[in-house]
Image (tube, rainbow, N blue to C red):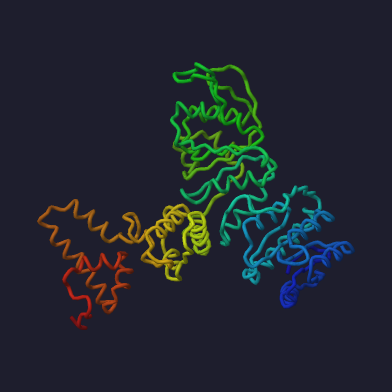
Amino acid sequence: MATASKEQTILLVDEDLDFLDWATKHLEAGDLRILRCDNGENAVKVADKTKIDLVISDIQIKPFDGLELLSRIRAKNPNAAVILTAGFPSTSQIIEATRRGAQDVLRKESLPFELRPVVESALQNLEHRERAHDNIPTLPDSDEPVKMIGVSRPLQEVFKIVGRVSQTDAPVLITGESGTGKELVARALHEYSPRRQADMVAINCGAIPENLLESELFGHEKGSFTGAVARRTGRFEQCDEGTLFLDEIGDMPGSVQVKLLRVLQEGTFSRVGSNETLRSDVRIVAATNKDLAEEVSLGHFREDLYYRLNVVEINLPPLRDRPEDIPLLAEFFLQRLVSKQGMARMRLSGEAIESLQKHRWPGNVRELENTIARACALSTTDLLLPEDMPFARSPFSESQKLNSAFETIFSTVPEPEQGLLKWLKTELCQRALDRNESDLKESARQLGITQSELREILGSRQLSEPKPSGS
């Protein structure tokens, strides 16, 4: 392992002695000194007596957890690098660890591949870290203020960025497809920030008419326009010292973009119909599902405003790119629904989870939540099966791509010629059935339709017996 020129000391902390043996052998190098402890209390004692460059600790240690050890280590040596490990680190653990200055939070199953490069990077940059004094405030232990769920690497990287950026006032631009949870990230940025005692106000820039959006943001004076029967306080005044979340910022009209730019540049604004200059200390977090750089090139969005907003960008991955998060999210939505509505306990079958993981989720997490809700409403048992998943019957889902394609063709073909297309559609289904030896379920899956649709297409054709070979 390539490290800095001087000898450096690593402290391993874990209750699992076999893990300590493995990590020692995995990391050993001539310029490294490796110390080991099996609990947090002993680790603190070792750190009191020895200058530790890097701590690698499991989160679930005793008599206090790895987060507390992180705080105690960095209280004595702010420049020490700390890497925490866990079987399945939670959202709050990742964010809180990053807030407190952890170098990284790694899943234990990924350590054979990730531990060495992460450690090497930490040690190579240690001299710079020693010159940088990180005074990162901490939150008291509490339940997670914002429920973001996921164990996938892409989402954990988002949690880490939230942990770092939440302590600054830098504007943040959250990008990603619709339904990925951009407002949840915005709320996490607020709830883990020093501004959490003030309000976070959310406004959808695409849902408010242009003539009212300016008033919504900056307020107005009585009589400033038709219907302004009294003075109104705008969102910037309402969330002074807090966070203003501008959702769908890409839909903001150009006239309002100019005034928002002024607030970001000067920190001042005026109510509609007033010449009085007001000030407000607001942290701006914006979100969009559009490509703002492209919108700038097309002249739809101001370039100067884009760079003001995009100081830090957080891109949320679509649900289809993190299938390992789907079972956790589905179970969370299911149990929350059961608890909220006082329903009998319901369960997801393994086959149902598999079907959820195979779906493309164009609507992302929001679509998954609605799918679980509809499945619960339609199911007649306490066990949810693949056929209970409503997306299997959605006209916009992949499950009807064959029918949708043929219906599109039928709509453009003269009626006398449609008989040929219907024959072709039926023949394709029959060949799929022959290829799969009359397996209706597999044939329907390959065609991208439901079993009932396949039966309907084939009509009176024989479904129970395979077609003779060679025919």
Residue 91 in picture, x, y percent from top left: 62, 57
Residue at the limit of the structure toward the right, as seen here: 49
Decide: is 263 above or below 55.
above
Displayed quadrant of residue 37: bottom right
Displayed quadrant of residue 244: top right
Residue 41 in picture, x, y percent from top left: 82, 65
Residue 141 in picture, x, y percent from top left: 71, 53
| Quarter in which the N terminus is drawn | bottom right
Q: Residue at x 30, y 69 (%)?
A: 444
Residue at the limit of the structure toward the left, as seen here: 416
Q: Residue at x 88, y 64 (%)?
A: 50
Q: Nearer the viewer, residue 449 or 4?
A: 449
Q: Residue at x 46, y 39 (%)?
A: 295
| Quarter in which the C terminus is drawn | bottom left
Residue at the limit of the structure toward the bottom, as seen here: 469
Residue 104 in picture, x, y percent from top left: 68, 59
Decide: is 339 above or below 306.
below
Q: Nearer the viewer, residue 270 or 68?
A: 68
Horizontally, residue 400 falls left or right of residue 410, namely right
Q: Nearer the viewer, residue 185 or 54?
A: 185
Horizontally, residue 62 falls left or right of residue 284, namely right
Decide: is 10 above or below 22.
above
